[in-house]
Amino acid sequence: MGEVYRRTETIARLKAVYDDMVRKIQAKLPPVEKRPRVGLIYYGNQRFTPYSIGHGGFGQAQYRDVGARDAFESIAAHTYGGSGEASAALDKEGLLALNPDVLIVPFAIYPPASGGTSRADYERLLALRDDPLIQRLNAFRAGRVYPGGTPLQGPIFYLFQIEMAAKQIYPDLFGPYCDDQNYRAAEQLFDRRRVAEILEQDGQ
């Protein structure tokens, strides 16, 4: 990216911020078998479309960086973005059979006014909290249902989304996630001032 946009030094400095944050996050992670099982899902028309973390690419990169354990690993070939086969559409019983500890709805960080629909789908998902079957899901019982970020992420937004994923998946380690992401300096997982200085230097 640095070579394409002729910003080699700027991108290298941003990557150093990234490397530092990811190294600190990964150093605190518990063994894989003790991590919560994370399910990325789209919700609409009373159906749940699973989205596997393990397909590679940039769309799920932040979840891999924080060592997320994929709740849909056993059906990865049938998830959205899988190996070319039709993605599975789970009903409530199917989702309960997989029973993620954390549920995240991609794109839902954007408000409905932005033209996207994922935030509205996320809010409809939350409205299912009184459904007898949905109440049995680990994610709902623990209050671990979150709006997800965008797979369309550049080097700056990527930093925020790694922080976002770490707080959503491991709040006991990195502090609870706030929807406005307005954290005190002590709660931030990377130095905003350092990023601002890098961008200021780039503009000179």
Image (cartoon, grey):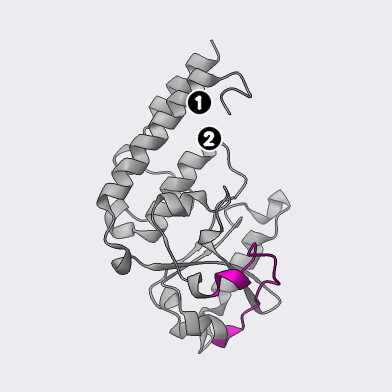
Given residues 150 and 108, the one toward you in this image is 150
- Circle 1 crowding by C-alpha within 10 Å: few under 14, some 14–19, many from 20: many
Given residues 109 and 100, the one toward you in this image is 100
Residue beneath the point at 70% across and 60% down: 117
Q: Earlier in the sequence, mark 1 or mark 2?
A: 1
Majority secondary structure in the magenta region: loop
The answer to whether mark 1 and mark 2 are in CB contact below 8 A is yes
86 lies above or below 203: below
Q: CA distance from mark 1 to mark 2?
A: 8 Å
Examine the rendering and report whether any part of residue 178 can be seen. no
Q: Position of residue 118 (x, y in %)?
A: 65, 61
Question: Magenta span has 77?
Answer: yes
142 lies above or below 183: below
Q: Position of residue 1 (x, y in %)?
A: 58, 29
Residue beneath the point at 73% across and 52% down: 115
Element carrying mark 2: helix
Q: For mark 1, what is the residue?
A: 11
Amino acid carrying label 2: it is Pro
Question: Magenta span has 173?
Answer: no
Q: For mark 2, what is the residue?
A: 155
Q: How many discs mark residues in the rendered view?
A: 2
Residue beneath the point at 55% across and 74% down: 75
> What segment carries the magenta color?
75-93
- Circle 2 crowding by C-alpha within 10 Å: few under 14, some 14–19, many from 20: few
Q: Position of residue 97 (x, y in %)?
A: 49, 85
